[in-house]
Amino acid sequence: MNFLEIHSLSKAFDGLHAVENLHFTVKKNTITGLIGPNGAGKTTAFNLITHFLPKDSGKVVYAGENLKKLPAYKVVQRGMARTFQQIRLWPNLTVRENLLLACSREYDSWWKSFTHTNEAHQDTQIDEMLDKVNLRKYKNHLASDLSYGQSKLIEIARTILTDAELILLDEPASGINPTLLRTVEDLIFELKKQGKTILVIEHNMPFLMGISDEVVVMENGRFLMQDKPEKVQSDPRVLEAYLGG
Amino acid sequence: MSDILIQLIWNGLVTGSLIALVALGLTLIYGIAHFIQFAHGEMVAIGAYTFMVFHKLSAWPIVPAALASIFITIVIGILLEKLFFKPVREHDPLIPLVIAIGLSIGIQALILIIFGPNILTISDHSYESYSFLDGALLATPSQILAFVFAVVLMIGLHLFLKKTKRGKAIRAISSNRSIGKTFGLSTDKSMMWVFGIGSLLTAIAGIFLGFEQNLEPLMGVQISVKAFSAVILGAIGSVRGAIFGSFLIGLAESLLVGLGIVASGFTAGIPFVILILMLLIRPEGLFGKRFVSLRQ
Amino acid sequence: MLEYLLSLLILTTIWTLLTQSYNLSFGLTGLFNLGHIIFYGIGAYTAAILNTDYGLQILPNLIIAAVVCGIVAAIFGLLTLRLSGHYLAIATLGAAMIAIVVATNWMDLTNGPLGIRGIDGPILFDLQITESWQILLLFLVIAGLCQWTLYKIFHSPFGRLQRAIQDDEIAARAVGKNTFLSKTWSLVLSSAFAGIAGAMYTHYRLFLDPTIFALPEIIFLILMIIVGGRGNFWGAILGTILVVIIGEIPRFFGFPDSIIGASRNILFAALLITTMFYRPKGLFTLFAKKAT
Amino acid sequence: MTKKFIAYGLGLCTLILTGCQNVANPSGNNAEDTITIGGIVPLTGDGAVYGVMTQNVANLRVEEINESGGINGKKLEIIWEDGKCTPKDASLAAQKLVNIDKVNIIFGGTCSGETLGAAPITEKANVILFSSVSTSPEVTNAGDFVFRTAPSDSSQGKVLGNYANKSGFNTVALLSEQTDYAVGVAGAFKDNFDGEIIEETYLSTESDFKTRITKIKASDPDALFLNPQTPPKFEIMLKQLQEQGWDKPIISNEISTGNIDARTKYADFLKERGLVAANFVAPDNSELTQFVERYEAKFGNKPEYINYTASTLDGVGILKRVLENTDSENTEAIRDTLYALQDYEGVFGTLAFDQNGDVNITHSLFRFNGEDFERLEE
């Protein structure tokens, strides 16, 4: 059964089509890559799917439910969370607070400010996650103290901690050194083991082809093909799309 | 009622011209420096008072007095930018905005101490107004000049921004400061030009306002608050928007009150009721493109 | 002299509460709302009208003022919270201007420029409190309770969410937070406390007119929060006290009456500019409790 | 945090305890041979020039009364308190005089804010509040025990309203500032003028009347009533009226009678429009001029406001007359005698109080002749 179905999705900015009747599917508990040359509309597609950007037309069906005009925060609450191309952590909050905001929800209303807030459970969750990405010692540092690579890991960790079923990663591997890359890979595989579904935008071809069960290719905002990694790598149209570009 | 329509439209055009002269400076400064220059309105008072000092106290004829006061206001405008806004140019826009608020109350206080609290007249003799269309329209020389100057300056500014090298540089830096840098366009020079032009326009507005309503330390506040809403009404950063917003407010005030649609006690609220209503319909202003919240 | 000091302390107690309420929506959530003074004025007028027309005393008036301001803020939020940055600042400044015009013209509600007189002083369970030091004590208790509540809100998960919204609202949505509702609550709460401060002012000053909405009050409020430090709980209180003291200095230097107001504004202008240049986070950063 | 909260709680309890104790202890009452009354005037702050003069006039008059036998042989004495020209300080002063000095009559507030601040306290204690300077229309219904010998500001509106009726104006346009003083005057004008009124108002922060003048011209009234709060606004009005070619008669409140340069700059404009203004002026009679000489002898300078000197003299005179034939402890009796007062001959002529405690002194009318204001005989 398809966990995510995209039907004729399109979006234009002052007449210029960033995404034009895009369609593809993501099967449950798989890792699906999304590739295409620069300007192919990958990030715009992400923004449209997660409703951070209102779509002109098209349908997004997530876990069998047509999302229609659901606000972005509700889409996340339904279980579809995403990271951003430029990292969006809260610089003036500590790493712990950045992660707590993802996994603790029951105390968000102001009247809960007067009851005793017991976030011990969330703290253990955060410690486990920080151990996985071995950034435990930065727990009480401000997010602004982290390096680029560390920030990327924390943003991925934060997205995972929202307990989402479908996780969309926007270039998780770009600009980080090989050791951290290994950590990202482990994280992704562990998510898959836990039954989650992952959709990844990535330019690092070896990395992407290595982890993806299927790959979707986009060109100039349109769907080019969707197939197994081997098929995609050997297909002349993909090469030409990248070269012709 | 209709026979006073012409006079009401004229009143609206005159008020609109004065607001536009302030709003143009505001929107240019916002375009390049990304904050609302709250102290910009005080330039009106500086222009008016310096003109009074030259024209009335030291009896210079009007034109030299005007040129001198405009020159001084431009110098003050550029100095303000150098001293107070240049150091915080890269900071979060809230910082220069709060500094501008501080400057505005500081300048008002200085004027109050130097010239005293009561109202001064800008020149001794009062000018008779000319009558046009056999009495249907009465306009004083200063009102006519104010309208003509405003139109001429608007066209001039438009040409300056479109045609001259400096104008293009300002537009480039306004759209994206890093692009400006890569092409070696000095932000400093452009800032100087923008604050200079802004001060020139407001000095002229100040002189004409002085002829309209005499001089008081807070004379800049009322008109700059209207200019703020005109700038946002049009769409922040757009010259066309600022002009349209200014005349919309000027005409709305005179027509709504003049034709009895709105009680005259509510005049001061009209610009803001229009602004808030419009923001409900088009949150990005009449001429603004619907910017995507994600692109910040 | 004692009488003057006591009245200054009473007013400072009211202003610290007003600054702290502004600290929630502007300091914590980052809503640059130049119209916060509207709720101070609405709270003041609510208490004045309830007292003179219906004979209600200070305690019920405080609560009703808070509720009325909360409701008005909720509506106000619906209109303005979609705006951000300078659009929000100018729209809210405009709302304050409209408030002045409405308060001046709506004769049968606010008695317009004649203002409302003959308001009762603080009366607790029909015990009239007239001595200044007693009023100060009562106001310290009321303001203390409000500050305690605000302290709890500042240092709660709700407070943490507000700081996140200020840093990056998109990211807050990306972790599933309803930022629009949260910002509205922040505005409603900060307006309710501003309303309480306004009601306290009414029951102390015993006279009220539309100038309570005027521009100088708006700038005074911004000065206190900037000096105190946006988002800094103790800073907001200390900042208010410092600004009040600085504001009173010209009075003792024997300046002639006409330029007391002007010299006070010059001091405020200098303070505002230097703070922004050298201490954008406020003069009391060492009091800013490290993040929880 | 909770420790702080307990500390506040304790503070509240002590507050309640001391609160009751304070009211309970009375101070000594009047000695047998003097009648003591209270007095509230601004001795500091911006109202001081009025307050000190009123105090001097009252003290001098009381001195003269005591020298010529006092009241039925008893000395009259006034305990003065500083009202600081604000409602709050005047209410504190009234609290002290009523609760501690146990006076039955308070002479004063000078600033209207003082009288309005003290009134709630004196009304609750049925104490007579007798002002000789407060002119705000709000004092009219400040209370049953509140009287004054200075005319209400709004009486300007009454006088000008009658003048407008007598001059045969059918419609009068009104350009009025939105402040308590101006709204008071405008209100009285509307109550007294029988014809139609076109009212245009503006906020004190506004200076652009062009559109309002255009609208007034279009409705073609018979006259224009200028009702500003301050002389500068009056001057801007004249400038913009001249620019829009206003050619109908102009009437105005007392602001235009001050020595302001607008009068010289627009002299002929105002002369041709036959400016008529209302003003509260003291009558020129011998009793007043002799008192002024005695005042100058004692204090070294003439009283600053001759009109308020006259109203204060009449105030003390009326109090003397009433105290001579009513028991000074019985405030209800004093109140009724004041309301019933018919034949008191004061500096301003025969005086009487209306049902609100306002005196029948009114403003007089003056026409501008190009240099100065000449009094208009009714």
Image (tube, coloured by chain):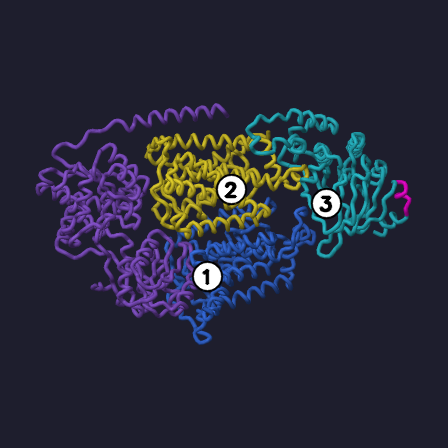
Instruction: Say which quadrant the N terminus of chain B sits in.
Output: bottom left
Circles 2 and 1 in contact, beta carbons < 8 Å: no
Query: For this view, does D94 lie left or right of residue C163?
Result: left
Q: Which chain is represented by blue in the image?
A: B
**Counting other residues with Cα less than 10 Å from the Cα at mark 1, is it few (<14), some (14-19), or many (20 or more)?**
many
Chain letter behind tag 3: A
Q: Along the horizontal axis of the image, is C104 left or right of D124?
A: right
**Residue behind mark 3:** A47
Q: Colour of chain D?
A: purple
Magenta residues, start to end: A229-235
Q: Which residue is mark 1?
A: B257
Chain coloured yellow here: C
Q: Quadrant of residue C12?
A: top left
Instruction: From the image, tell me which residue sits under label 2.
Output: C71
Q: Residue furthest bottom?
A: B134
* Residue A231 highlighted magenta (yes or no): yes
Q: Residue at x 32, y 42 (%)?
A: D87
